[in-house]
């Protein structure tokens, strides 16, 4: 379970970096490490995941908020993710302690969730991400990326 959560967390964070890749300096932002610090159940269908994420940001300060995502397999949403807002400090390589709420969709069956333990099935999943990006100057924009192959994100991080 912890390995699955770690892989999904890496994919979401990589997707956030892809969201920010509109300008040359921002393209250099990279996720250097992801560690699951702890997992705490929330009701019957959710978990809070506490992460320690290493991010190298050679660019300017960037605020990230309204971070939401969904994991899909065969066109069906299996789960949703919401992360607390955070700020990437300018010209820094830091470890950020982040919290994400991962919830299982009401329509997802137990067999579909257990199938995610199979790497082949996990690699067939798609990710939708939306994030509100705000620069230090106050300029903000909502960015959405849909149908990102999870396999591509996991390969790009070597996980």
Image (cartoon, rainbow, N blue to C red):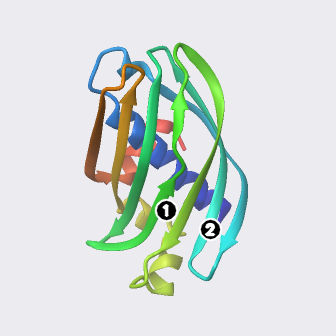
Taking depth in this image into account, of 102 and 152 the one nearest to the observer is 102
Q: Which mark is residue 30?
A: none
Name the residue: 45% across, 86% down. 109
Q: How many marks?
A: 2
Q: Where residue 89 sits: x, y (%)?
A: 55, 22
> Taking 152 as reference, is 105 above or below it?
below
Looking at the image, residue 109 sits to the left or right of residue 35; the answer is: left
Q: Residue at x 35, y 62 (%)?
A: 124
Name, please, the residue furthest toward the front.
Answer: 138
Q: Where the C terminus falls, by quadrant?
A: top right
Name which residue lies at 39% across and 57% down: 69
Q: Quadrant of the N terminus?
A: bottom right
Label 2 neighbour load within 10 Å: few <14, some 14-19, many 20+: some
Which marked residue is nearer to the observer: mark 1 or mark 2? Answer: 2
Question: What residue is shown with label 1?
Answer: 119
Q: In x, y percent, where is residue 47?
A: 62, 68
Give the class, few, some or many, for how many residues have Cα within 10 Å of label 1's Cα (few <14, many ≥20). Answer: few
| Residue 140 rendering spot, x and y as whole percentages | 31, 32
| Quadrant in which residue 14 is drawn | top left
Disc 1 is placed on an element classified as helix
Task: Report which residue position mark 2 lands on.
Answer: 47
State the image coordinates of residue 135 (x, y, percent, origin top left): 38, 25
Q: For this rendering, which residue is in front, 36 or 44?
A: 44
Horizontal side, residue 142 vs residue 109: left or right: left
Q: Quadrant of residue 100?
A: bottom right
Decide: is 63 above or below 67: above
Q: Is residue 40 above or below residue 98?
A: below
Report how far apart the C-alphas of labels 1 and 2 lie in the structure: 21 Å
The kind of secondary structure element at disc 2 is strand
Dot 1 or dot 2, earlier in sequence: 2
């Amino acid at each position: 379970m912890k390995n699955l959560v770690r892989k999904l967390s890496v994919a979401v964070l990589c997707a956030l970096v892809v969201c920010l890749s509109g300008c040359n300096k921002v393209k250099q932002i990279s996720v250097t490490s992801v560690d699951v610090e702890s997992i705490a159940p929330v009701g019957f269908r959710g978990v809070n995941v506490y992460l320690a994420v290493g991010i190298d940001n050679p660019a300017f300060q960037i605020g990230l908020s309204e971070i939401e995502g969904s994991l899909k397999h065969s066109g069906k949403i299996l789960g949703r993710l919401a992360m607390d807002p955070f700020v990437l400090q300018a010209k820094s390589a830091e470890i950020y302690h982040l919290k994400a709420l991962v919830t299982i969709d009401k329509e997802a069956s137990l067999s579909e969730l257990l199938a995610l333990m199979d790497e082949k099935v996990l690699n067939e999943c798609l990710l939708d991400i939306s994030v509100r990006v705000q620069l230090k100057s106050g300029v903000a924009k909502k960015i959405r990326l849909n149908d990102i192959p999870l396999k591509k994100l996991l390969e790009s991080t070597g996980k």
